[in-house]
Image (spheres, helix red, strand yellow):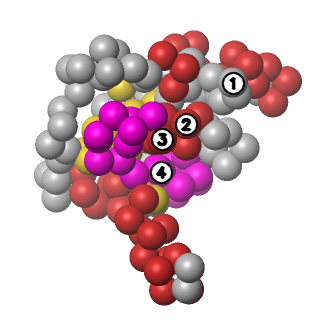
């Protein structure tokens, strides 16, 4: 793959927090999908996000998701791959998906709000985060 194609592909499949916030401000349809466990989601997530743990994604569990909007998957951040697993499974089911670069961590670093608590995943309890597996 040449360099230009690589960067075009990256932009086609990844999105950063600023672009998500801008899409939201402009009223462009998107759905934030937290691929972590219900416990991690309950502790802290992005405003308006739904919880769809990657381990449970099936055609049945996604039947009610809209097919006409961009789904943006995320997890804790660069040390977590739940967003990648979620994006892959959703793409295989025919959804249009982008992965949020840096996840929850970079979202907060960029100054955007979170909801439902202040706890985040602890590296010592990563299994509870829904990051692995």
Report the quarter where the C terminus lies: top right
Q: Is tag 2's residue or tag 4's residue first in the polypeptide sequence? A: 2
**Which residue is situated farthest in the right direction here?**
124
Q: Are marks 3 and 2 in contact (CB under 8 Å)?
A: yes
Q: Position of residue 132 (x, y in %)?
A: 70, 28
- Quick one: SS at disc 1? loop
Residue placed under numbered mark 4 in the picture: 100
- Quick one: SS at disc 2? helix
- Identify the mark at residue 75; answer none if there is no mark: none
Residue placed under numbered mark 3 in the picture: 88
Q: Is tag 1's residue or tag 2's residue first in the polypeptide sequence? A: 2
Q: Residues within 10 Å of mark 2 (few under 14, many from 20)?
A: many
State the CA–CA distance, disc 4 to disc 3.
13 Å
Residue placed under numbered mark 2 in the picture: 85
Of residue 19 and residue 61, the one placed in the foreground of this image is 61
Of residue 47 and residue 130, the one placed in the foreground of this image is 130
In this image, 127 relative to 91: left or right? right
Q: Residues within 10 Å of mark 1 (few under 14, many from 20)?
A: few
Residue placed under numbered mark 1 in the picture: 133
Q: Is tag 4's residue or tag 3's residue first in the polypeptide sequence? A: 3
* Magenta extent: 89-110
Of residue 19 and residue 117, the one placed in the foreground of this image is 19
Q: Is residue 108 magenta?
A: yes
């Amino acid at each position: 793959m040449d360099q230009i194609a690589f960067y075009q592909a990256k932009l086609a499949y990844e999105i950063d927090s600023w672009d998500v916030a801008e899409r939201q401000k402009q009223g462009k349809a998107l759905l934030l999908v937290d691929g972590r466990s219900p416990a991690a989601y309950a502790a802290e997530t992005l405003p308006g996000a739904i919880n769809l743990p990657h381990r449970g994604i099936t055609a049945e569990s996604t039947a009610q998701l809209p097919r006409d909007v961009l789904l943006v998957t995320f997890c804790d951040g660069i040390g977590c791959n739940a967003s990648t697993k979620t994006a892959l499974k959703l793409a295989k089911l025919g959804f249009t998906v982008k992965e949020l670069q840096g996840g929850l961590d970079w979202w907060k670093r960029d100054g955007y709000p979170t909801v439902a608590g202040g706890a985040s995943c602890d590296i010592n309890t990563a299994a509870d985060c829904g990051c692995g597996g």
